[in-house]
Amino acid sequence: MDLKKHAAPLDIIKILLGTLITSFAFCFLTFPNSIVSGGIAGVAQIINLLTGFPIGVATILFNIPLFLWAWRKLGRRFVILTGLCMVLESVLIDALAPVARPLTTEPMLAAVYGGLFKGAGYGLIYTTGATSGGIDIPARMLRRRYPHINFSTFSLAINAAIIFAFVLIFRKFDSCMYTLICMYISSKVVSLLLYGPINSRLCYIISERSDELRRAITERLHRGATLLEGHGAWSGREEQVILCVVKPPQIGPLRRMVREIDEHAFLVVSDARSVYGQGFESILEEDK
């Protein structure tokens, strides 16, 4: 297998760094404080606590049938990079286990910082287009079969089942609570690394003076605008809806401008996670 055909050198660096960070968080923060990992690693953690069987080895064994199942359906690049992540993380966890000492015995600190480190590590991995394996594979397969259900919903359901099993077996209800905190923080950090902060606002303006507002937006805010044809459900009148995207500092000037031109206008502002085009991110940028 020639890894260079499927991944750029930067991708390999991200995978190496990401797996090192997640393994560190597991061995020195979450596992010593009985904070459950999600997915296959969580199952391996339960087995380790019951039998002493190495977590990394168990993770690899559980992942083998999943990778064989996904090889043809999810693409060679995804399976190869995800397999690399899974093996590296598993090996590092077992290698660090003999020397691992908890950095803190305070579960809340372990949940917070474990979530931060895990989110940073997995975020780096996800930017390459790979995952750490485990439940991400069946979740993706289920998403293809049931496209009306979000990917995160599948992952959440599987993780919830694993956490519930941990609670039933070990009767550690506080561990469940700390685990949820850790997972929440981790998901937020992953989202931040993948999509960046919310740096744009999507605005809809409904006004009888749409022509004046359109000119003001383009001339005073130097932003483009699109006119959409609308039909008032209550008034029954034909109306034009202005759609525009602005930066957060421009929301105040836009609101004042709308109020100045038409104080009866209807302004809707929502977050825009990603915006591609002139004045924003390049649409030519490679999508990982």
Image: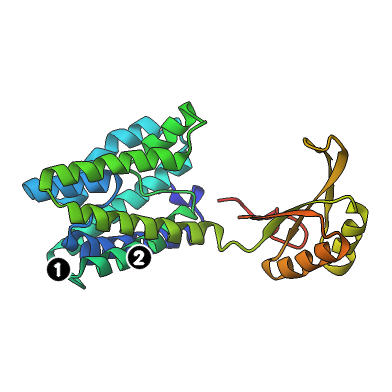
Q: Is residue 69 left or right of residue 270?
A: left
* Alpha carbon separation for disc pair 2 and 1: 19 Å
Report crowding for label 1: few under 14, some 14 to 19, many 20 or more residues within 10 A (C-alpha): few
Would residue 179 be visible to someone looking at this image?
yes
Q: Are marks 2 and 1 in contact (CB under 8 Å)?
A: no
Residue identifier under label 2? 117
Q: Is residue 166 left or right of residue 238?
A: left
Kindly indicate the quadrant of the structure image that contains residue 251. bottom right
Q: Residue at x 86, y 42 (%)?
A: 239
**Tag 1 secondary structure:** helix
Q: Residue at x 11, y 50 (%)?
A: 49
Residue 115 marker: none
Residue identifier under label 1? 99
Q: Give residue 207's position: percent from left, percent from top.
A: 84, 51
Q: Is residue 112 above or below residue 144?
A: below
Q: Residue at x 19, y 64 (%)?
A: 96
Mark 2 or mark 1, whichever is nearer to me? 2
Q: How many marks?
A: 2
Q: Give residue 105's position: percent from left, percent from top.
A: 17, 70
Q: Residue at x 68, y 59 (%)?
A: 201
